[in-house]
Amino acid sequence: MIIGGFLGSGKTTTIRKLVEYLGARGHRTAIIVNEIGEVGIDGDTISGGEVETREITSGCICCTLRISMEHTLRSLMLSYSPDTIIIEPTGIAFPRQIKSNIESMNIPEISFTPIVNLVDPSRLSPKVEDLQNFVRNQIEDAEILAINKVDLIGQEKLLETCLLLRKVNQRARIIHFSARQGGESLEKLFGLIGVNNQDKTARRVRNSVKTRNSIEARNSIEMSGVSAYSTEFEITSQEIPLETAVSVSGQILDSIRNRITQLNPEFTGHIKVSFAHKENFVKGSVTSAHEKPEIEILKKEKNSCSRLKILSAVTSVPREELIRTVDTTASGQLKDRQLSYIKVEKSNHGYNQVPISSIKQRNF
C-alpha cells in the first residue's frame, strides 16, 4: 500500500488508524516510513497492534534512495514475512514512480492496492494553475484521492476541493473523511484499499507492468522547491516533568513557525517535533504560517533516555536559514528551561554509506 500526500496532509494519523484496521482482521503489517531529513520521527509515532516499522531517511525513495528501498523491502520479507507492507513516502515524493521502481525490482509475491494520495483541503488553492508542480503530479498519480481534515472545513470548501481534484485527475476515486475523528468515512477508505481488493489489484499490477518503463524518472527533491533539515538532541537532565516536555515542544514549534513566516509569509510544509519522555511520547506539528501548533501525547514503552527530535521541510526558504532557525531555537529553548543536552550528530547514528538509516522494530 502506497499512501502519499503533501507534507502535513495527515498520512501518519491515517496510517495509525489503518494499522488498527488491518490488525483487527489478522493482518501481519510492516511499515516503511521515508523522511526527507537525516532524523526520522514518524516511525516512532505509528502505533496500533503489532507492527514492524522501518525508516529510510536522508532523501526520497522515489529517486535518490531507490537502492535503500529495495534492500529494506527484501529484508522485511525475509525476516518478518508481512501480509501487508504500507509505504509512507516523504511529502514531496511521486507515488507512481515508487510503484514503478518496486515493480522493476522483480520481488516475487508482491501486488499493489490502489495508490492513495491524501489531500489537506485547507491548503489547496481553487485554481489548478496555482498548484506547485509536484503537488499536481501527486494528484495525477493517485488512484484514490483522499480528502482529509474535513472536520476543519465547510461544505463549500469541500465541493471546491472535489472540483479542483477532478480537473487534475478525471479517473481517481474521490473520498473524504477526518482521520483524526475516524468513523465510517475513514473505514470506507480502508475497505477500498484493504483485504477485499487484493485479487483485483494484483490483476491491475500485472496489466500495468507492460507500461511501467514509460514512466519518466523525476527527482522530487529538485522539483519541489522544499528545503529540509532535521536534528536530534539527547536530554541528559534526569528529572523532567511531562509538562516541561509538552511546553518545550510547543514553544519550539511556535518559534520556528514565527521565524519561517518572517522569511516566507505563505510557506507550506511540515515542522515536526517529538520528545521521548519516560513512558510518554510528545508529538507536535505545524504545517503553515496560518495555523497553531498541534500537540499530542502518546503512550509508549519506557524510553531509555529523553530525546528531542525536530524535522522541518518548508517551501521557498533557504536551507541555511532553516538550519540556523531550527538549531538556535531548539538550543535556546532547552537552555531557557535549564535542561542539559547533547546534540546528536549524524555520524553517531551509524548510518551506512547508502543511507538506510535508523532502521528500527516497534512492537506495540
Image (cartoon, grey):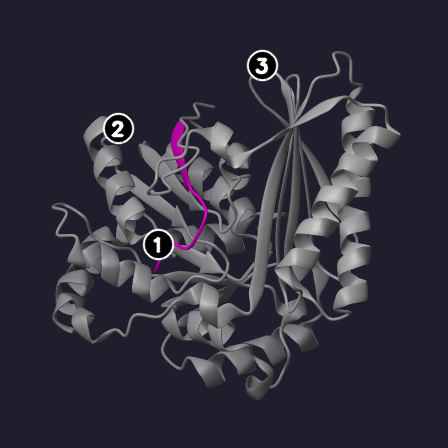
Could you say which quadrant of the image residue 28 lies in? top left
Q: Which residue is mark 2?
A: 80
Is disc 2 surrounded by few (<14), some (14 to 19) or many (20+) residues within 10 Å?
few
Q: Tell me which residue sits at (12%, 71%) in the image.
A: 210
The amino acid on which the numbered mark 1 sits, given as a three-letter code, is Ile
Q: From this viewpoint, is residue 48 visible?
A: no
- Asked if residue 16 is among those painted magenta in the image, a careful observer would answer no
* Mark 1 vs 2, N-terminal side: 2
> Which secondary structure, mark 1?
helix
In the rendered structure, which segment of residues is drawn in magenta? 50-64
Is 181 in front, or is 245?
245
Q: Which residue is mark 1?
A: 193
Q: Tell me which residue sits at (48%, 48%) in the image.
A: 35
Q: Are marks 3 and 1 in contact (CB under 8 Å)?
A: no
Give the x, y percent position of residue 4.
44, 58
Q: Nearer the viewer, mark 2 or mark 3?
A: 3
177 left or right of 29? right
Q: Nearer the viewer, mark 1 or mark 2?
A: 2
Q: Nearer the viewer, mark 3 or mark 1?
A: 3
- Asked if residue 60 is among those painted magenta in the image, a careful observer would answer yes
Residue 156 vs 267, above or below: the answer is below
Spot the residue most to the right. 336
Q: Which residue is mark 3?
A: 304
**Main SS category, magenta section:** loop
Q: Whole-Å distance between the Cαs marked 2 and 3? A: 25 Å
Residue 356 vs 162, above or below: the answer is above
